[in-house]
Image (spheres, grey):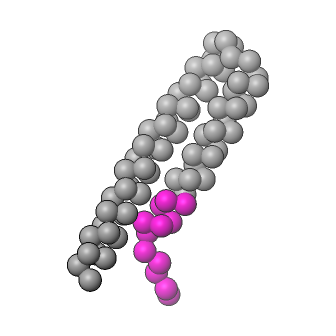
Amino acid sequence: MARRDDEERAEEQAAREELARLREEHRDLDTAIEALERVGAGDRLQIQRLKKRKLGLKDRMSFLHDQLTPDIIA
């Protein structure tokens, strides 16, 4: 039983670490997109790819957040 608890804690910690990493990457992409749009240096295709990547990160972050948040049954 204790081994199972340890495994669950390790999985939860790994999910929290991944979530933190994804949030950081999401912020970095946001900054990069804003900079490219502001200076007009990036082509539209490059900006669209960055936005698509950012959306994928947001989806993964939502999934991890849901996994880490306990269900509350009303």
Q: Does 26 sit above or below residue 2?
A: above
User: How many marks on residues?
Assistant: 0
Magenta residues span: 63-74
Viewer-proximal residue among 37 and 71: 71
- Hey, which residue is sitting farthest front in the picture? 3
In the figure, is residue 7 to the left or right of 2? Answer: right
Is residue 65 highlighted in magenta? yes
Give the residue at x 71% y 24%: 46
Location of residue 36 in the rendering, given as x and y in whole percent from the top left corner? 63, 19
Q: Does 33 sit above or below residue 19?
A: above
Give the residue at x 61% y 40%: 54
The N terminus sits in image quarter: bottom left
Location of residue 25 in the rendering, given as x and y in whole percent from the top left corner? 49, 37
In the figure, is residue 31 to the left or right of 21? Answer: right
Is residue 4 highlighted in magenta? no
Give the residue at x 50% y 31%: 28
Location of residue 3 in the rendering, given as x and y in whole percent from the top left corner? 26, 75
Location of residue 4 in the rendering, given as x and y in whole percent from the top left corner? 31, 76
- Hey, which residue is sitting farthest bottom in the picture? 74
Give the residue at x 52% y 53%: 61
In the figure, is residue 68 to the left or right of 61? Answer: left
